Image (cartoon, rainbow, N blue to C red):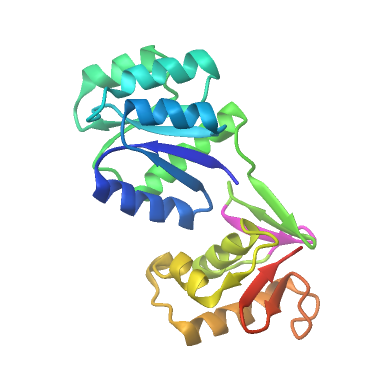
Amino acid sequence: MTKILLVEDDEAIVKSLTEFLKMEGFAVTNAKGQSDALRLAGETEFDLVLLDISLRDGNGFVVCSALKQDRDIPVIFLTASGDEHSVVAGLEMGADDYIAKPFRPRELVSRIRTVLRRTGKGKQVLEIGGVYLDAEKGAAFKNGADLCLSALEYRLLSVFFHNKGVVLSRTKLLEEIWDAAGEFVNDNTLTVYIKRLREKIEEDAGNPLIIKTVRGIGYKAGE
């Protein structure tokens, strides 16, 4: 799973952005300031850093400089709208891209995937049982054919694939997909979508091998 370090001290932005990025299949860790970001980056190998310039503790320029000098981690700056000076300064010190606040989450995800592709970071294709999930294309394939999943089916499959071998409760699944594609999802709807997904990806939907039921607990993909 692609690991992202989000360096941002606005709690509202952190909460909403973390939830959205997790829905898109990214693992997100938050750092509230300069020292926290440098500590976390030293402990974990991240694939990309989303970096606010103005931090309560230090600033994003110091963090970017340190990260680029140490391991050349891809960096996308989150900048205040119209702050041309900050944009230029960030790009000159090696930032890979920038996006101005307020931004649309899907535009940010597109920028993230472009930077990951350009820098060769992050695993874009996952496979279980002959079914391939291509994060770059936002599609799933079997035997070379597009499975033509709906947005919510794709999100549900993405949650399973990014948690291979992990037993996921129905409550956990609902938390992960509750606002995918703007559709309302309750417990009964989840049952319907899992059934539809199995019909598309399994050789025998009545005897699933990719998305297995763990009785009394939930579901598990793969081993």
* 184 part of magenta stretch: no
Residue 26 percent coordinates (x, y): 51, 48
Left or right: 191 in relation to 88:
right
* 143 part of magenta stretch: yes
The answer to whether 35 is drawn above or below residue 21 in the figure is above
Quadrant location of the C terminus in the rendered image: bottom right
Q: Quadrant of residue 130?
A: bottom right
Residue 125 percent coordinates (x, y): 67, 48
Which residue is at a point 40% across and 30% down the rendered structure image? 37
Magenta-colored span: 138-146
Residue 190 percent coordinates (x, y): 52, 80
The answer to whether 67 is drawn above or below residue 4 in the figure is above
Left or right: 66 in relation to 61:
right
The answer to whether 191 is drawn above or below residue 151 in the figure is below
Residue 62 percent coordinates (x, y): 34, 17
Which residue is at a point 74% across and 81% down the rendered structure image? 205
Which residue is at a point 48% across and 17% down the rendered structure image? 68
Left or right: 30 in relation to 193:
left
**Main secondary structure along the magenta-highlighted residues:** strand
Left or right: 73 in relation to 130:
left
> Residue 42 or 53: which is nearer the viewer?
42
Which residue is at a point 38% across and 77% down the rendered structure image? 184
Q: Give the total number of marks visible in the rendering.
A: 0
Q: Residue furthest left?
A: 82
